[in-house]
Amino acid sequence: MSAITALQKGDSLEPVTLEPVSRIDLIKYAGASGDYNPIHTIDEEAEKAGLPGIIAHGMWTMGNLAKLFTPYYEEGFIQNYSIRFKGMVFLGDVLTLHAVLEEDYEHEMAFNVQAVNQNEEAVIKGKVVFSRKVPTY
Amino acid sequence: MFEHTIGKQSNKVKNTVERGAVKNFAEAIGDPHPIFIDEETGRQSPYKANIAPPTFPRVFDYGSIDELNLPSKGLIHGEQIYHYERPLLVGEVILCYTEVKDYYERSGKSGDMGFLKVKRYGTDFDGGLIFSEEQTVIITEAVRKEMKV
C-alpha cells in the first residue's frame, strides 16, 4: 500500500466491493449503533412503512465508506466527512466504495467519495477532507 | 411545526469512548482495523492510543431537548456532516450536547416536507471542540399528519 500523500489530483484510492448486504449486517449495526428503527431489521415493519423490504441504515453505508481511509491514519485523519443519502440499500445489494482525490491543498486533501450499487447507482455521495496534520497528544 | 425549537440546546452529557463499544462498532461497519482495536497498535500510532471510527459518535448520549418530540418512525435521513479537530481516543471522557440549527418546510412531489437540521457536539472539559455532527432529517407530510393527531 502506497502513501495517501503520494496521490495526485484525479487519482483514486483502491475501490472496495462489499459482500452482499445481509440481515445480520444490519442487526449487528443496529446493536452497535443503538439505532433500532425496525425498518432496518424487521420485514413487516418495512412493509408497513411502504418499503419493498428492509433497507440498510444510511449510517451503516456511511460507516463502511470511511474505511477506504482507515489504512492511512499514520499520515493524518478524516477532518470533514459529509454525505448525502441518495438511494436505498436493500438486502443482497452489492456496494462498491470509491474515493477520488479532487483537490490537494497544503495541509488537506479533498476527496469525492461515493458508494454505488450493482446497478452503478450512487446510494450515498459526498466528500472527505483528509488532514495531513497529525494532531499532537 | 418545529420552528419554535430553533436555537434550543440540550444539557451536556458526560460520555466515555468505550473500548468494547468501539470494537463492536468497527466490526459492525466491516472495519475491524487494529488502529481501532489493538492496544499495542494504538500505543505506537501517532495518537498514542486507539481511536474511534469517524461515524462512531452515533452511539453517544447528547441529552434531550424538551420541545423537540420527534416520532421514532418515518423520518428520512437526508444529509450527515462530521467535522473533527482530532480523532476521538478510546477511553477518553467527553461532553456531548445537541442543538436545533434550523427548521423549514418546502412543497414537493409527495406533499409538504419539513427539513430539520440538528447539530451535535463533542467537547473536552475545557469546552474545546473535538467533533461536531450535523444531520438533516426530512419529515414527510404523512409523518407530520400523524403527529398532529
Image: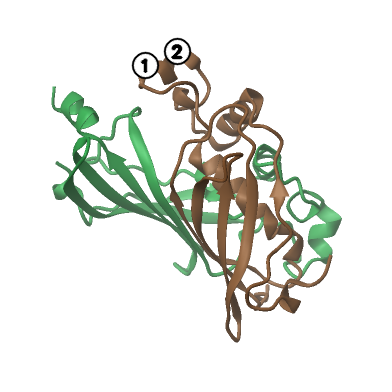
Chain colours: A brown, B green
Q: Residue at x 21, y 43 (%)?
A: B114
Q: Is residue B3 above or below residue A110?
A: above
CA distance separating discs 2 and 1: 6 Å
Q: Is residue A122 above or below residue A82?
A: above
Q: Residue at x 62, y 66 (%)?
A: A100
Chain at tag 2: A
Residue type at tag 2 = Glu
Residue B12 makes an appearance in the image: no
Q: Residue at x 57, y 59 (%)?
A: A113
Kindly identify which numbered label has been placed on residue A48: 1
Q: Residue B119 vs residue A76: left or right?
A: left
Assess whether mark 1 and mark 2 are in contact (beta carbons under 8 angstroms).
yes
Residue type at tag 1 = Lys
Label 2: few (<14), some (14–19) or many (≥20) C-alpha neighbours in 10 Å: some
User: Split into 4 quadrants, where in the image is the C terminus of chain A?
Assistant: bottom right
Q: Secondary structure at mark 1?
A: helix
Q: Position of residue B12 (x, y in %)?
A: 39, 52
Look at mark 2 in the image and give the residue it sits on. A44
